[in-house]
Image (cartoon, rainbow, N blue to C red):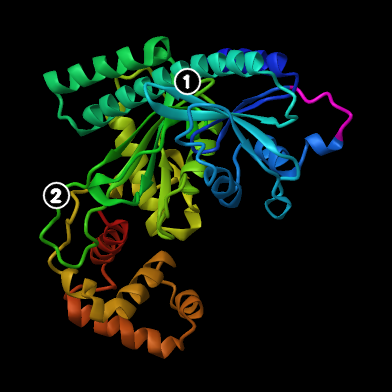
């Protein structure tokens, strides 16, 4: 598909005698023609940034959109705006299909193009629009099928969703994939997923509604998540999934919460194990939210004990530990977790907490009275440690 776009952009460049650039309607670069001019002005900051970063700034987008390019059905001439980095006037060819704008072809405006040339170039733009529309429909179909697959229980419904996803992906369905989860995703249950084109390597994206809330008032409310199915070059190479996660964490135009984290599953060949891969990706994202040392993006293989903790039922809290999880005892809960993380070594725990050792002992005695647990007993310590780590995962 990308080769088709490049050929069509090159065709526009040949028709109008100038290098052309194709962007989608969100001003993300799709293809660009070769620049072989001796005129350095042809590579003003806007075109350079678009090619190097594959996107335009909000200021540039605002400048161009004020000329009505999203509604135009004919070429639009746009004057220079040095303050926005647009040093040369532009010629915009709206890329439309079915009455909807899907992108734009950009050229420097030399004002020397004939009506016949512009008509021919707009015909090429229409062919590009048909391709982009078809790609958008395929992406929407794949996203819906992915959402149905991840949200279904084992049985005929899951089988039907998997076959629908297979049909939407075509030959790529049997390739290696990883699943990426971003948690939470902005917009709540009705949030929108970005288009696959905006995320490198993404074959399908969907918003996954939160699970039902639990009765435990001490836990965070369930959160909406974003799922991305990412194509891999090989089942041993997770690089494309890491790149896709980084792009999703940028928000793609949405205000991603500072607490948001991304999780990446182990690679899978084909589609049969995608629900299990989704569980891994969600667990890794939850682990990253609970454990800062994991960073903003965590892979399932790297989350250690959280692989088991994430399998516990959401909202599971041992009755003995429940009082400690009340917000009024957050300092005590943090003290207990640091103490247990340091294998019960009082000196190390007190140093990390920046308190006197006697203050630590006082807090530990309060924790024992509050929970009824004996911190000299190995099983009681294990129970408390598991409960605290599980509570930190959230839903």
Left or right: residue 389 compared with residue 10: left
Q: Which mark is residue 209?
A: none
Q: Position of residue 121 (x, y in %)?
A: 61, 17
Q: Dot 1: few (<14), some (14–19), or many (≥20) neighbours within 10 Å?
A: many
* Place of residue 392 in the rendered image (x, y in percent of width and height, measured from the top left): 31, 61
* Residue closest to the far top: 171
The residue to which callout 2 is attached is: 212
Which residue is at the far front? 115
Q: Residue at x 35, y 49 (%)?
A: 185
Which of discs 2 and 1 lies nearer the camera? The answer is 1
Relative to 332, residue 34 above or below: above
Q: In this rendered view, identify the residue nearer to me: 370 or 219.
A: 219
Q: Secondary structure at mark 1?
A: helix
Which comes sooner in the sequence, label 2 or label 1? 1
Q: Main secondary structure of the magenta part?
A: loop
Identify the residue shown where x is 48% and y is 27%.
73
Please tell me in which quadrant of the rendered image residue 229 appears. Answer: top left
Residue found 42% across the figure and 54% down from its top: 256
Magenta-colored span:
34-39
Query: Residue 15: x percent and y percent?
Result: 69, 14
Q: Quadrant of residue 30?
A: top right
User: How would you rate the neighbour count of disc 2 (Cα within 10 Å): few for under 14, some for 14-19, many for 20 or more?
Assistant: few
Is residue 121 depicted above or below 345 in this figure? above
Residue 155 visible from this viewpoint? no
Q: Nearer the viewer, residue 161 or 8?
A: 8
Rendering coords of residue 356 (x, y %)? 46, 89
Q: Secondary structure at mark 2?
A: loop
Relative placement, left or right, of 279 versus 234 is left
Decide which of 391, 226 is in the foreground and name it: 226
Name the residue that disc number 1 marks. Answer: 129
């Amino acid at each position: 598909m990308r080769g088709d776009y490049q050929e069509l952009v090159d065709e526009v460049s040949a028709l109008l005698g100038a290098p052309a650039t194709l962007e989608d309607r969100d001003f993300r670069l799709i293809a660009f023609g070769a620049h072989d001019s001796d005129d350095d002005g042809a590579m003003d900051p806007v075109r350079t940034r678009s090619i190097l970063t594959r996107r335009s700034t909000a200021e540039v987008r605002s400048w161009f959109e004020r000329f009505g390019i999203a509604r135009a059905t004919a070429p639009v001439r746009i004057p220079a705006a040095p303050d926005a980095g647009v040093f040369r006037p532009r010629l915009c060819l709206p890329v439309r299909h079915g009455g909807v704008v899907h992108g734009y072809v950009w050229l420097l405006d030399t004002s020397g193009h004939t009506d016949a040339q512009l008509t021919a170039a707009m015909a090429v733009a229409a062919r590009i629009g048909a391709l982009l529309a078809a790609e958008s429909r395929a992406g929407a179909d794949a996203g819906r099928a992915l959402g149905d697959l991840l949200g279904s229980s084992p049985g005929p419904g899951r089988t039907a969703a998997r076959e629908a996803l297979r049909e939407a992906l075509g030959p790529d369905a049997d390739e290696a994939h990883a699943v990426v989860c971003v948690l939470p995703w902005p917009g709540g249950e009705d949030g929108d997923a970005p288009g696959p084109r905006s995320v490198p390597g993404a074959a399908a994206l969907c918003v996954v509604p939160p699970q039902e809330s639990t009765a435990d008032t001490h836990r965070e409310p369930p959160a909406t998540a974003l799922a991305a199915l990412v194509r891999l070059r090989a089942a041993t190479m997770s690089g494309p999934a890491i790149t896709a996660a980084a792009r999703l964490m940028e928000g793609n135009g949405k205000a991603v919460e500072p607490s948001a984290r991304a999780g990446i599953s182990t690679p899978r060949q084909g589609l049969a194990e995608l629900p299990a891969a989704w569980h891994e990706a969600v667990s890794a994202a939850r682990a990253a939210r609970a454990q800062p040392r994991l960073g903003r993006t965590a892979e399932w293989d790297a989350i250690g004990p959280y692989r088991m903790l994430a399998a516990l039922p959401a909202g599971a809290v041992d009755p003995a530990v429940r009082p400690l999880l009340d917000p009024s005892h957050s300092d005590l809960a943090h003290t207990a977790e640091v103490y247990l993380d340091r294998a019960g070594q009082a000196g190390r725990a007190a140093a990390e907490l920046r308190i006197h050792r006697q203050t630590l002992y006082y807090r530990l005695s309060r924790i024992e009275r509050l929970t009824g647990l004996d911190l000299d007993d190995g099983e009681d310590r294990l129970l408390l440690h598991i409960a605290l780590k599980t509570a930190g995962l959230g839903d």
